[in-house]
Amino acid sequence: MEKKITIYHGSNQIVEVPTFGVGKMNNDFGQGFYCTESNDLAKEWAVSSLHDGFSNRYTLDTQYLNILNLNSPNYTILNWIAVLVEHRVFAIKTPVARRAKQYLIDNFGINVNAYDLIVGYRADDSYFDYAEAFINNAITVEQLAQAMRLGKLGEQIVLKSQFAFSKIQYEGFEIADRNTYYVLRKARDDDANKTFLKILEEESDGLYIQDIIRGGIKNNDSRIPRNLSK
C-alpha cells in the first residue's frame, strides 16, 4: 500500500470530519469508518432506490499505521469469515451453525481492534448469504472461495483506531446519482445471486464446516483456500 492513498466513503450525507468511536458495532469488521479506494463503489454504496448519495473523498496517510490486510496470502478465507461471524448478525439455523460460529472465532478469529486499519472484502447482500450458507453447512469451503472469486467483490478499507482517524483529511465530495449507481449496485447483487444459486445446486466432495470441526482443522491446513483476491 502506498504511503498516501485516496479513499472514498459512500453515504447519504457529506462527512467532512469522520468521527472516531461512532458507527454500528455489527458492521463487517466492527465499529469503524468504512471506505474504499474506488469512487464508483463508494457511489454504489451511497445510493438507495429512492435517494441519491454522496461519495466523500479523503487523503489518508498510511505511514506508521498497523494494517491488517485480510486479502493477503497470509490469511485464509476462514479468517475473513471468522471476523464476520464475530461482528455481523447471522441466522443460526442449526446446532452445527452454533458450533461453527464458536469454532471459527476460536481457531481463525483475529482481534481487529488491535489494528489501525483493516483491508478486506465487503460482505454485501448476496456475499453475506454465502458466508451464512457456509456456517449452516450448506456449502463447502471450496465453494465459498469459488463464489468469492467469481463475484465482483468490493474491497473496503476501514479506519479502526484514533491514530488512523488523525491521519485522514477531507478533500471534497461528488454526488452519486441513484439512476446510475443503484442500477449498477443491483446488477452486482443479481450476478452474485445467480452465482450463489448455481453453487447451491452443485454437489461437492470438499470440506464442509462440520468436517472442519470434526477434523480439528486449523488455520495452517493447506486445504483451506488463502487470499480471496486473485
Image (cartoon, rainbow, N blue to C red):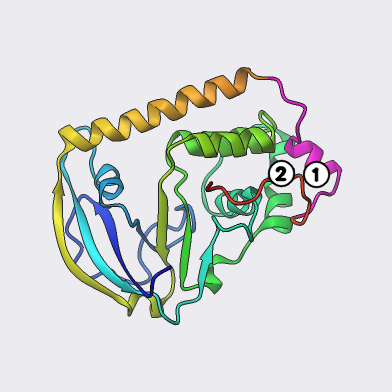
Residue at coordinates 51% horizontally, 34% vertically from top-left? 150
Q: CA distance from mark 2 to mark 1?
A: 7 Å
Q: Nearer the viewer, residue 173 or 62?
A: 62
- Amino acid residing under circle 1: Ile
Residue at coordinates 61% horizontally, 39% vertically from top-left? 145
Part of the protein shown in magenta: 203-218
Number of labelled discs? 2
Residue 124 sits in which quadrant?
top left
Q: Main secondary structure of the magenta part?
A: loop
Residue 116 covered by magenta stretch = no
Earlier sequence position, callout 2 versus callout 1: 2
Residue at coordinates 15% horizontally, 40% vertically from top-left? 177
**Residue beneath disc 1:** 213
The x, y position of residue 37, in whole percent, is: 33, 57
Q: Which mark is residue 100?
A: 2
- Amino acid residing under circle 2: Ala
**Which quarter of the rendering shows the N terminus?**
bottom left
Note whether 5 is above or below 187 in the view shown.
below
Residue at coordinates 31% horizontally, 52% vertically from top-left? 38
Residue 79 sits in which quadrant?
bottom right
The x, y position of residue 72, in whole percent, is: 57, 58
Residues packed near mark 2 inside 10 Å, few (<14), some (14 to 19) or many (20 plus): many
The x, y position of residue 140, in whole percent, is: 69, 33
